[in-house]
Amino acid sequence: MGYEAVIGVETHVELATRSKMFCGCPNGFGAEPNSSICPVCLGLPGALPVPNARAIEATVSLGLALGAEVAPHSVFHRKNYFYADLPKNYQISQFDLPLCRGGHLDVEAEGGTRRVGLTRIHLEEDTGKSTHLGASGRIRAAEAVLLDFNRSGVPLMEVVSEPDLRSPEEARAFAAELRAVILALGISEARLEEGQMRFDANVSVRPEGGSGLGTKVEIKNMNSLRSLQRALAFEAERQTGLLSAGGEVEQETRHWDEAAGCTRAGRSKEESSDYRYFPEPDLVPVALEAALLDRLREALPELPAQRRARYAALGLDAGAARLVAEGDGYGPLLDAAVAAGADPRQGANWLTGEVTAHLRRLGITLADAPLTGAHLGELHGLVAAGRLSATAAKEVLAGVLEGEGTPAEVAARRDLIQISDETVLEAAVAEVLAAHPAEVERLRAGEQRLIGFLVGKVMQVTGGKADPRRVSEAVRRAAG
Amino acid sequence: MPVPIDIAKVARLARLALTPDEMEAYGAQLGAILEHAASLQALDIQGVPPTAHPLPMLNALRPDEVEETLEREEVLAQAPDRDGPYFRVPPFMEDE
């Protein structure tokens, strides 16, 4: 019997605010350890939290972008548990009154689009960071733990999906699409390698095409799209193996071990009631005004799916549309290029091809490069007028990226402009034909392949700056 | 009527190591508190909206602005143990 996976994903996202969630400490990655700390995020007695309005707006913006219902009345709760990186012994989170409920995200899946429902989006605070010392980093055998509270209290948004995903690949596509939306909104840098976006997932398996739900397992600790997919694939296979052998799946929390490539049973059996959630007495409820919601709704940018559809309508293939829509700064640049007269497909090819490759060679990002939409429009004009070959256009792009000036300036400086003066071209052709009378005779006698030979000679005498297509025409005319 | 509670579980969640005598004593005291709280359930609260806070206040928020932080040396000097710029604590296991 075949089995299919039923998957829901919980995504934690650190928001890119200036200050932390409940205090004014700077929210930034890479600061000196324990340099961004205060009584609130250290959990010192008597310290009082005050929520960051921008973090709430960012969370609501994501909800609005994904069609969620924004709660008219939202409350923060205390989630009580003991861990050394949680100095208050509780995390301020949300329980039954999250900021957003419902909504959905469409994911391109095998065989069409999968609409993935969202359960909720809520806001909480991140914990400090612990480093286990000794015994080569193995937690179980550590000698001591070092704590850095810079991350303590950083705004952490949690997006919980419905169990609507049907394969590890779909779960990965969902996470990638969610990340693209978050980047488009500018509410987080969502750098996976820095832990700004982290995943937990619920997975069960059931007979293919079935409608019931199997016993689910929660997997924690996935820090990349790749480990999300790998962990789910491992777990779905493990559960399928158990059921196929007549066994049962135990409901439990398992941890993904990236190095070993497997999930392991956790020791914790804590249930939701063990967290003893109760309303945070230090905070009053949040009820966002309609005017604020209207303002946030109006400020929503074009979302990745809309942008991809727009580029597809301009003639870009699906791959190029995705690359341009999601590459940082690529979409706005292509839009500016098209406005400046560039062909959309040509522009997209340059951006995803030569520009991307050369940026990598230079070790800079598009944002740091001096390339503008006007440049691409101008380059398109030069190519369309036959003044630059396709190959020369790529070299011109490299020059522009290196700061040598506009396409026309780079082409002139690097001596790439093709001969467009018809009389110069005719003279070069006449010179070559006069120098090779025997070949001209054979061509006239019907040996067509000699055209290539003669065109090559003309390219030689013009230093490669003639348009081969026009040279070929001129040779035919002169010899014909 | 006393409310039955699993005092051992409550103690474990609060990370309290209680002796059997203490469990009995605190169990009885906590039961009496819950019994008192349970009397509230006799009230008719039909039509009374749930309240999350005693203050009639909403949206006590702050703008996203950076404020002063504590001096690291001053904070670390008050910790039981440190290691360079870090707080140092005894080892603990991931899922304890």
Image: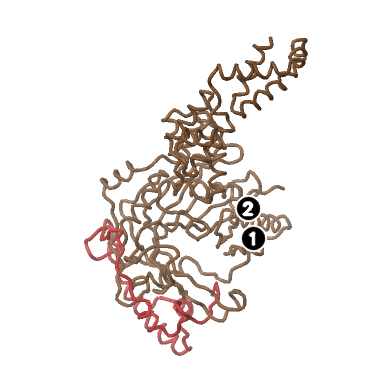
Chain colours: A brown, B red
Does A272 appear above or below A182?
below
Please report whichever mark, 1 or 2, sits nearer to the chain's N-terminal start. 2
Label 1 sits on a secondary structure element that is: loop
Percent position (x, y) of residue A378?
45, 30
Percent position (x, y) of residue A124?
40, 61
Residue A370 is at least partly visible in this image: yes
Could you tell whether A129 is left or right of A443 in the image? Answer: left
Percent position (x, y) of residue B17?
47, 85
User: Residue at point 55% right, 72% down?
Assistant: B95
* Within-10-Å neighbours for mark 2: few <14, some 14–19, many 20+: many
Q: Are marks 1 and 2 on the same chain?
A: yes
Task: State which chain disc 2 sits on.
Answer: A
Label 1, label 2: how far apart the Cα atoms are: 9 Å
Percent position (x, y) of residue A456?
69, 25
Please tell me in which quadrant of the rendered image residue A459 appears.
top right
Label 2 sits on a secondary structure element that is: strand
Discs 1, 2 touching: Cβ within 8 Å: yes
Residue named by callout 2: A205
Residue named by callout 1: A249
Give the position of the C terminus of chain A as an image quadrant. top right
User: Residue at point 44% right, 28% down?
Assistant: A341
Task: State which chain disc 1 sits on.
Answer: A
* Within-10-Å neighbours for mark 1: few <14, some 14–19, many 20+: some
User: Residue at point 51% right, 58% down?
Assistant: A198
Could you tell whether A10 is left or right of A302 in the image? Answer: right
Amino acid type, label 1:
Val
